[in-house]
Amino acid sequence: MAITANQIESSNTLEQFRQEFNSLQSDVSGLEAGTIAFTTIETTNANTTTLNVLEDGTIKFEGATDDGFETTLTAADPTADRTITFPNSSGTVALSGTSSLTVADGGTIGSETTTGAITIAANGNITLSGDLTVSGDDLTMGTNTSGHLLIADGTNFNPTAVGDLSEISTIASDDVFLAVDTSGGGLKKVARSTVVSGLATSSAISNVVEDTSPQLGGDLDMNGQDIVTTSNADLELAPNGTGHVTIRGNTNQGTIQFNCENNSHGQQVKAAPHSESANNVLTLPSTGGDARLVSATSTATLTNKTLTSPVLNTATVGTSIVPSSADGATLGTASVEFSDLFLADAGTIQFGNDQEITLTHVADVGLTLTHVTAGDNLPIVLQLKSEEDAIIADEVIASIEFAAGDSDGTDGATVAAGIHAIAEGTFSASANATKLVFTTGVSETAASSATAKMTLSSAGLLTIADDFMIKDGGTIGVASANDAMTISSAGIVTFKDDIVIKDGGTFGTSTTPAAMTIAAGGAVTFSATPVFPDGSIALDDLDIDGGTDIGADLTTSDLIVVDDAAGGTNRKAALSRVVTLMTAQGFSQEDPTALAIALG
């Protein structure tokens, strides 16, 4: 946190003064809480000798870059007044455990009593003013060759190989050997005469070549040397009977190393560790000529090799995996199955000895199932078969389901459409009635349990759950007359031939479905009075011969049908109007001839 308040100018407003005052109050609170960060602290007038930091306080240095990394200077809780004095010089403060300590060329490091106990020259040589005590076991030097001795040359101690020492050409009787007293006496000198006397007493001095059956009285210590042969002779180890050569283990497993011809590289054959309790026998191959061994990490090519129940964690196949014979191998077993199978773009799975059926990947599209054999009547057949032996009505035999991705939620993750073969009854040796059910999703699953949108029964009956629509002017018909019925864009239905309905069948509307009934004999019965357009029925078409006689004499109240003013509009009229007309024409009611003329 930095200082946020700014100076107030004479041009500032009262609101700006209030804002800067509030910022100043926040800055003062930050100073009191110790959360204000400063770029530079100068103590030139106030408390010029001491900078006090509150309890658990710290001083943080941002460094050259204003970022999230700082150097914090803090102090452990002192139990008394402590003073840290910086020297009157420029340099870098060394930290314990993380930085090196550098002194001037020829500088010294010491104690309060002996300030120059250690002097370090410009070339790095160190001079001690007192004794050097090594509390550890080792003295490490820049030149530290195994087997060398640290020998004084009159000025310095230097590591020296025994072979580099001056050689004694003749051992005098008073020359001595350097030996280790195994009784606990450490390094001691041994006189030549004592060594010779000890060897002679133990009969140790003899000519090994002359001993035809030499035996070791103890372990043979090679002492850093080799067992060698001359004149290209073999080095043979010949155990007796069923004995064998054992390479014993020590702190590690028994190991044999085979070096290259320059002895600059070596390969080892190593026994299994003790934890594996291994006692197996490895037998080298006996046939096939010269060969190379194959290891778990080497790169090698195996040809004509039989692997029985191998376990391959990751196998790289150069060309193909081929069974020993046609139909002679499987991928996986009934209890040990493969997981995923990955094929490249346009990869194929080929079936049959002739590979006539192929399943081919079409990149970014899907799969193609093909009968590749050319010829007549060779269709491709994809059969979905259920091996259930007890099929009963309404059981699903097989389904084809369509679904999209599931990223859009519950409905989007369900089956969107399906075609399902569902049994209509119990299957037997003489029955397999099946219907095809078509389902589509709206906001539902379209699995076989969904409401059918269209069903094709075993008898060929097609049932549709909603409207059936064809194109404008489309036709519906049969094989012999595919345009038996035509439906125009306005919905007008035109029949190519007769319309025949069942005996007693009806025609009607949605409100009155039985508006017209046609009996078996052809009689038409209307549920309401029929209405015909004016002039639509010719007079010749009216046949009253089969009508029922009135059964009584005519009266003036009886009705007749007249053509009103010969205008084509039929109306009723009472016979009284005929009498009135006759009277107006001068006929008498007693004149029967006139009445007959009037009545036609």
Image: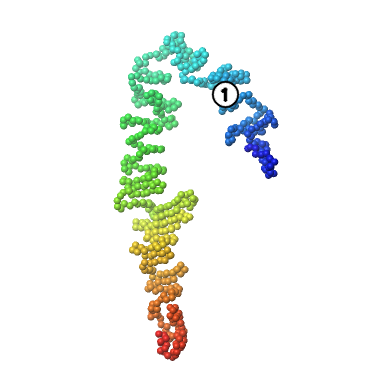
Residue bearing mark 1: 102
**Camera-side residue: 590 or 3?**
3
Left or right of 443 in this view: 306: left
Percent position (x, y) of residue 502?
A: 38, 69
Percent position (x, y) of residue 583?
A: 46, 88
- Looking at the rendering, which quadrant does residue 256 occupy? top left
Percent position (x, y) of residue 224?
A: 42, 20
Which amino acid does the dot numbered 1 rest on?
Answer: Thr
Q: Is 396 above or below relative to 153?
A: below
Quarter containing the C terminus: bottom left
**Camera-side residue: 130 or 222?**
130
Q: Outermost residue, top direction?
A: 173
Q: Is 142 above or below relative to 458?
A: above
Left or right of 318 in this view: 154: right
**Camera-side residue: 591 or 130?**
591
Quarter containing the N terminus: top right
